[in-house]
């Protein structure tokens, strides 16, 4: 079955539907959207901040927020840095209250809005992308459907399945994962606030949901979840109960419905699109730590930006996709600075690897003397792509170099510009992976 259209979108989440809706709002383009109905117990992410109202209005989806069974959100209360609760109430914000979403209903309402707006929904899983001889893309699905289109959008979330097929590296900055738990019962405390609490080796949050349910999420690094077998309720529950505030929510009457482990890393595509006629949007382009509570709003804002860039590209203008990619990258650099700031506010567990990794801004001491170790092991994409990590090593040659000189040298050697933060963290990563050896100026080896 072949569908001909202007734009093919893969992924029917907020970003995929948002981009389809925003494109149709601009002009009557033909759009096909591949949507895979997931057999999951529950989707994750429910707190929508009031600032999203303006984006929802621009997209024309305020009605979807009004009509579905969401709860109002009064704000966030957090115990971060010490165990005292601090309230960030939306009451005092011009945009009013936020939402505690029924996420499955919200995502479905956007899909329905796109369908009603004329978007052709293909119910299946995306399987591959090929470029046809006529310069068009061919998107294939697992049930044998083929979409021939001029422009392709990757909206598959952190999987970035389309970009992956095109060979674009996904750059990870950490290994954050969450053990998400769905509960039946109504939390007597904090019924309309999202509760955030830092704990040793991670942090957790809880939020009420419509229909007398609530969620808890425990965030830590992937290795910790595995080592402590946190997927097992008898290992997870004592840990949540020990958190001073979240523990209070888990009364005897709360019934655990189920748990899920989800990836929650900070990650981005090496480049989020190309003038050849594709781009990534939402989490597929760049994914933020859920501590930011920004993912859904970012997906809505990204949809508007993506639609503008695609519209220009289809109209024959060049440069808009490149500009879109640069905005994703600079937005991510700003986000990294904020992430560092928030994690830095917690000083109780400075030596804990989870906190230390997120709090170290200057990853290498300017006086360290660095030299290639000769290790040949392949380097995975981290902070920058493995190709750039190889280029950094090549820039060192066989010389031992002081760290502050090395940063200057590497910056000059690379064809692409990166923020100093990313360059320094990339060199730190090469030290940790054993590809760069560190010596003190007196010839001794620094303990890391
Ligand atoms: C634990 C956790 C808690 C969070 N809490 C919040 C929160 O409270 N507030 C907030 O704003 N954000 C939160 N987020 C982030 C937020 O959920 C995401 O940023 C948001 O869902 C991104 O939307 P998206 O459409 O880009 O991606 P997704 O929501 O991941 O949607 C991607 C879609 O692509 C589909 N897909 C993937 N592969 C294929 C394929 N091969 N074929 C067809 N379809 C495919 C998927 O089925 C899915 O429908 C949280 C994230 C996590 C991990």
Image: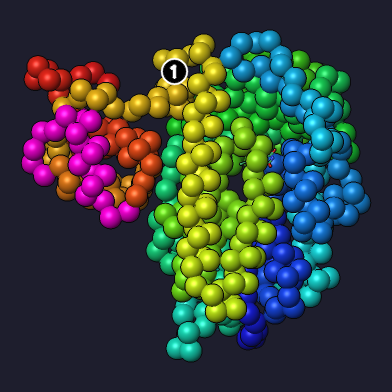
**Residue under the point 86% across and 42% down:** 70
Residue 393 location, quadrant: top left
Q: Kindly identify the residue that appears in the image at 63 percent across and 80 percent down.
A: 6
Residue 348, horizontal then vertical, whole percent: 52, 11
In the picture as drawn, the residue positioned furthest to the bottom comes out as: 134
Magenta-colored stretch includes residue 163 = no
| Local SS, label 1 | loop
Q: Can residue 406 be found in the magenta stretch? A: yes
Q: Which residues are magenta?
A: 397-416
Could you say which is closer to the camera, residue 275 or residue 43? 275
Q: Residue at x 90, y 49 (%)?
A: 66
Q: Nearer the viewer, residue 56 or 113?
A: 56
Q: Quadrant of the C terminus?
A: top left
Instruction: Work out whether residue 1 or residue 289 is closer to the camera in this orientation and state it.
Output: 289
On screen, residue 55 versus residue 299, left or right, reads: right
- Percent position of residue 131, x then y: 46, 80
| Residue 149 percent coordinates (x, y) | 58, 80
Q: Is residue 130 above or below residue 169?
A: below
Residue at the spot 66% in from the left edge and 16% down from the top edge: 79
The residue carrying mark 1 is: 352
From this viewpoint, is residue 162 visible? no
Q: Nearer the viewer, residue 327 or 78?
A: 327
Residue 392 as seen in the image, left or right of residue 270: left
Q: Residues within 10 Å of mark 1 (few under 14, many from 20)?
A: few
147, above or below 179, in the image: below
């Amino acid at each position: 079955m072949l569908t001909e259209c202007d734009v093919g979108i893969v992924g029917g989440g907020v970003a995929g539907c948002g981009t389809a809706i925003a494109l149709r709002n601009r002009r009557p383009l033909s759009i096909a959207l591949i949507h895979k109905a997931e057999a999951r117990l529950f989707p994750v992410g429910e707190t929508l901040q009031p600032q999203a109202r303006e984006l929802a209005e621009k997209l024309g989806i305020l009605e979807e927020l009004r009509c579905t069974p969401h709860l109002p959100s009064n704000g966030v209360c957090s115990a971060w840095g010490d165990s005292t609760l601090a309230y960030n109430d939306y009451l005092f914000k011009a945009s009013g209250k936020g939402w505690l979403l029924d996420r499955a209903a919200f995502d479905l309402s956007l899909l329905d809005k796109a369908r009603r707006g004329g978007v052709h929904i293909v119910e299946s899983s995306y399987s591959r992308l090929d470029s046809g001889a006529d310069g068009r893309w061919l998107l294939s699905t697992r049930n044998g459907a083929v979409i021939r289109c001029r422009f392709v959008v990757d909206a598959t979330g952190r999987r970035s399945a389309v970009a992956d097929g095109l060979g674009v590296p996904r750059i990870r900055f950490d290994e954050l994962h969450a053990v998400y738990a769905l509960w039946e019962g109504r939390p007597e405390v904090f019924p309309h606030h999202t509760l955030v609490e830092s704990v040793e080796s991670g942090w957790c949050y809880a939020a009420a949901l419509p229909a007398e349910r609530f969620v808890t999420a425990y965030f830590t690094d992937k290795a910790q979840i595995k080592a402590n077998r946190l997927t097992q309720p008898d290992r997870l529950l004592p840990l949540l109960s020990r958190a001073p505030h979240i523990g209070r929510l888990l009364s005897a009457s709360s019934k655990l419905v189920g748990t899920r482990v989800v990836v929650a890393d900070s990650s981005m595509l090496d480049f989020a699109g190309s003038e050849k006629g594709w781009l990534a949007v939402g989490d597929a382009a760049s994914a933020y730590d859920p501590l930011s509570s920004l993912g859904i709003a970012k997906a809505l804002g990204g949809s508007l930006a993506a639609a503008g860039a695609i519209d220009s590209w289809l109209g024959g203008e060049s440069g808009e996709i490149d500009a879109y990619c640069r905005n994703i990258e600079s937005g991510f650099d700003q986000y990294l600075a904020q992430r560092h700031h928030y994690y830095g506010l917690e000083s109780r567990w400075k030596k804990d690897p989870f906190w230390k990794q997120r709090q170290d801004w200057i990853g290498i001491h300017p006086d360290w003397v660095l030299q290639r170790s000769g290790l040949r092991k392949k380097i995975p994409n981290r902070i920058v792509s493995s190709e750039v990590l190889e280029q950094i090593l090549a820039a060192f040659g066989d010389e031992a170099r002081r760290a502050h000189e090395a940063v200057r040298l590497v910056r000059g050697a690379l064809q692409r510009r990166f923020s100093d933060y990313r360059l320094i963290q990339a060199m730190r990563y090469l030290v940790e992976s054993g590809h760069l050896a560190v010596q003190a100026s007196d010839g001794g080896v620094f303990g890391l």
